[in-house]
Amino acid sequence: MKRKSQRIQTKSNTKMKGSLARHITVQLGQVALMPLQQQQDSSPFQNLLDTDSDKQHFPSTSSLDFDAADANITDEKDFILSQDFFCTPDYITPDAPAVLSSLDCKNEEHVPCPKSPEKIKTVRSKRQRRADGISETSFNFGISALQEMSELVVDNSTSNDIQTAKPHEPGKIQRYVSQSAVALRCRVMPPPCIKNPYLKDASILEIDPFNNQRSKCADLFPGVIGGDGLSRYRTDFQEIEKIGDGNFSCVFKAVKRIDGCMYAVKCSTRQLHKDAERRKALMEVQALAALGSHENIVGYYSCWFEDEKLYIQMELCDHSLSLNKFSNLITEAEVLEAMHQIAKALQFIHERGIAHLDVKPDNIYVKNGIYKLGDFGCATLLDRSLPIEEGDARYMPQEILNDNYDCLEKVDIFALGITMYELVRGSALPQSGTQFSNLKEGKVPLLPGHSLQFQNLLKVMMDPEPTRRPSAKELLENPIFNRVRKAAKDK
């Protein structure tokens, strides 16, 4: 009898558990009862659902009466855990201690808290980027600041910037940088180092530590040619007046705010949109920088691109020898003095393998009685390794007009001779006609009031055969300059 009563009690407890499960299912709506891991033996909760599937309607929860003793007697395996209702297939339920009875709350403070589950490490593939000019390959920065920047951006990147698994080469640290990091790096990266073609030994300058990273960015001067709302010219200089104007550039007299000195700032008249145009404009700057400082060459200080225009900060001179601006008659002694000093400048640049190719009165400046050669926009190399651009045709010899570039240094001698002839004559040279052709052929008219020695020197310098013209060094050794040297010593 006792066994029969226990059997009936167990059966009633089983029915109560199944009824409780079905009631909670109805209360919560549709609940996915999918187990996290497939085991060989089905869970007790699943067995209860299977056995009670054919039962009648469930009693209400109010009719259920739980007893603490019955809960302790019940087998732990048959108890329904809350994890069975709420676990999902992609979440691992942590191992928890034995679940206490719902009515046993005396020692609730001493129940240990279960540990948080560890996040599952999943391998996600990277989406294919659009072909927008930014490569997906990793960048290996050479500066710690750029490394920190890339790591910071990678940590804060969105789900679109997911790392991809690529073969790892031994000894290399791979980093994956988002598109936003590449754009930021292009802003903070300095402009590329450009090789100066006028320097003889520029092999060390060919090494660019940012070459690999720079290929991901834009082309030449990405961060300095565009207008960003700030003008270096307006910020650093106070413009006084315009002192020169040409076909390709204009010159302003300006005072630099930080040192209070006057400078000549040369600015290109039109914007340089193409990379080839910017490189061509830089030829003058590179020639001046390669030559360095010389007493008879206009000083060069700095240059920069602003609003896609090239600005060159140069030495400010008093005036040029242009007949349009300097109308005073020049004596033979003054002409010899100017010729002697410009010949020293030509000797200096010829020894460094550079030809000026635009010697004329407009490009000879005066400062405190010193004559200076300026405007190296047409400068090229004597070995003809650079493109040759002719200067003013009125001062060019006939071989240049015939595309004969064998003796480029003698071109400057012819231009200096005909320049001195124009200054002594006091009138502009003809641009065409018979007089123009006669001067190209070396037929120099007589100059009344000037010594034959001086006129013969001009004829030799303007000889149509370039090999018969003296070099700059030979010109300086001419005895006619002895009185010039004597006058310089007396000063």
Image (cartoon, rainbow, N blue to C red):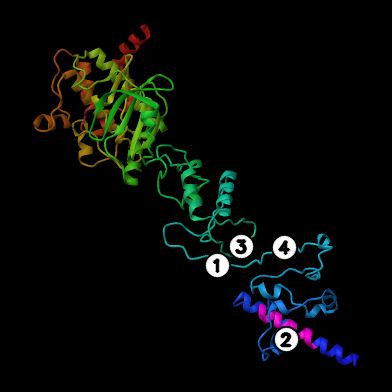
- Please tell me whether residue 19 belongs to the stretch shown in magenta: yes
Residue at image mark 3: 168
Image mark count: 4
Disc 4: which residue: 116
Q: Pick whichever of labels 1 and 3 is earlier in the sequence.
A: 1
Q: Which of the numbered marks, if any, corresponds to residue 125?
A: 1
Which of pointers 1 and 2 indicates the residue nearer the eye? 2
Spatial separation of the CA atoms under disc 3 and disc 2: 51 Å
Say what amino acid the circle numbered 2 marks.
Answer: Asn
Comparing 489 with 179, the one in front is: 179
Above or below 236: residue 96:
below
Q: Earlier in the sequence, mark 1 or mark 4?
A: 4
Say which of marks 1 and 3 sits in front: 1
Q: In which quadrant of the rendered image does the N terminus lie? A: bottom right
Residue behind mark 2: 47
Callout 4, which amino acid? Ser
Taking the magenta stretch, the answer to whether it contains residue 487 is no
Q: Secondary structure at mark 1?
A: loop
Label 1 is placed on what type of residue?
A: Ser
Q: Is residue 335 shown to the viewer in this render?
A: yes
| Mark 2 surroundings: few (<14), some (14-19) or many (≥20) residues within 10 A | some
In the picture as drawn, the residue positioned furthest to the left comes out as 434
